[in-house]
Image (cartoon, rainbow, N blue to C red):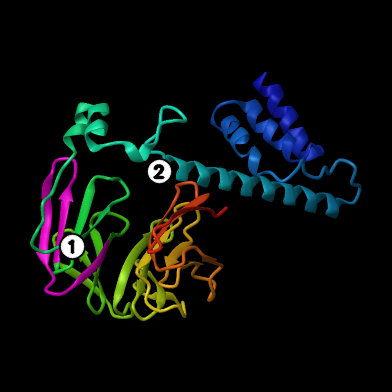
Amino acid sequence: HGKDGGASGGGGAGGGGGRGGGGGGKAGKGGKDGGGGGSRAKYLRGEGVGAKGITDKKAKSRVRNSEREFEAAAAAASRADELLNDEYDAGYLEADGPMERTYKFKQEEVLGAVEQQVRRSALELELPEHGPYVAKYDRGGRWLMLGGRRGHVAMVDAVNCRLQAEFHVGETVRDVAFLHSKALVAVAQRKYAYVYDDSGMEIHCLRTHLEPTRLDFLPYHYLLVSAGRTGYIKYTDVTTGELVAEHRTKLGACEVMRHNPHNAVVCAGHSNGVVTMWTPSASAPVVKLLCHRGPVRALAVSRDGNHMVTAGMDARLRVWDVR
């Protein structure tokens, strides 16, 4: 049966079956490729063009090549989608019914519902001296980076509740961010952004990032993004240390910035209630959205990239469809 399925699929791709025939051929072989054919079906745009009735050899070859390119693009999009879903499927609350609300959950209830091993990783820190603090977890969720406004920076193993590194930079700390792993962290200080290793040693000073207020890292592009009091959004390639792009927002200092985990678009909130969305290749915002009547104080984007939540000084919390 597998041999017949492969033969019919090959005939479909070469003899005019189009994209559907090519997918069926791979499914006929069974195994991993068959599952991939089904998962990438939503990325195929239509049934495809058959080459069976074309008599011109050059035209027939061009049609076949274009169909192969469409198949390859759909397979690549499917693999990327699976990678994103695997990474962002963990770490959220789900209500049992339509009447239950997740914002009513208490920490005691969450701890009572999880496994004992997970319960051990819960920690409560009291840091009264160098606050207020900003806190960032790495992509794996094990390492916690703390940055105090008075210059205190600490890295904590959230699983074992152990202090990995601790140091004082001697000036104001506005934000922190992990890079591709816990080995390197970025700190937004009073005048510049700095990169440190996991022992607290300074690796690099990013002098192009002037007076940064927010930092974010795009893991699939190896880009460190900053928003500053100068009104610029700046992208730096951490592999080379070069400034890739800088965009002037023309909206003053930016105190809120997060990236969309689905497509890596950077969302910045401004003091006039506007949220702008940026990419390195576009000098102007790809989206400009009036969200609040006052300054934007916080924003977050869902894992699938479909919804954005914003909070403003107008005492409103709003959910936006950003598909």
Single out the mark in the foreground, 1 or 2.
1
Percent from the top left, x then y, of residue 213?
A: 30, 71
Magenta span of residues: 152-176
The image quadrant that residue 209 belongs to is bottom left
Above/below status of 274 relative to 141: below
Find the distance from the CA under tag 1 to the CA under tag 2: 30 Å
Q: How many marks?
A: 2
The quarter of the image holding the N terminus is top right
Q: Residue 54: percent from the left, percent from the top?
A: 89, 46
Q: Predominant secondary structure in magenta?
A: strand
Q: Is residue 222 visible?
A: no
Q: Position of residue 116 (x, y in %)?
A: 20, 27
Percent x, y of residue 229: 33, 78
Residue 75 versus residue 268: which sits nearer the camera? 268
Q: Residue at x 84, y 54 (%)?
A: 58
* Residue at the spot 14% in from the left edge and 69% down from the top edge: 151
| Residue density around tag 1, few if under 14, some if 14–19, many if 20 or more, within 10 Å | few
Disc 2 element = helix
Residue 307 — which label? Answer: none
- Residue 132 is inside the magenta segment: no
The residue identified by callout 1 is: 132
| Residue 248 shown left or right of residue 26 in the figure | left
The tag on residue 87 is: 2
- The type of residue carrying mark 1 is Pro
The relative height of residue 133 versus residue 90 in the rendered view (above or below) is below
Q: Earlier in the sequence, mark 1 or mark 2?
A: 2
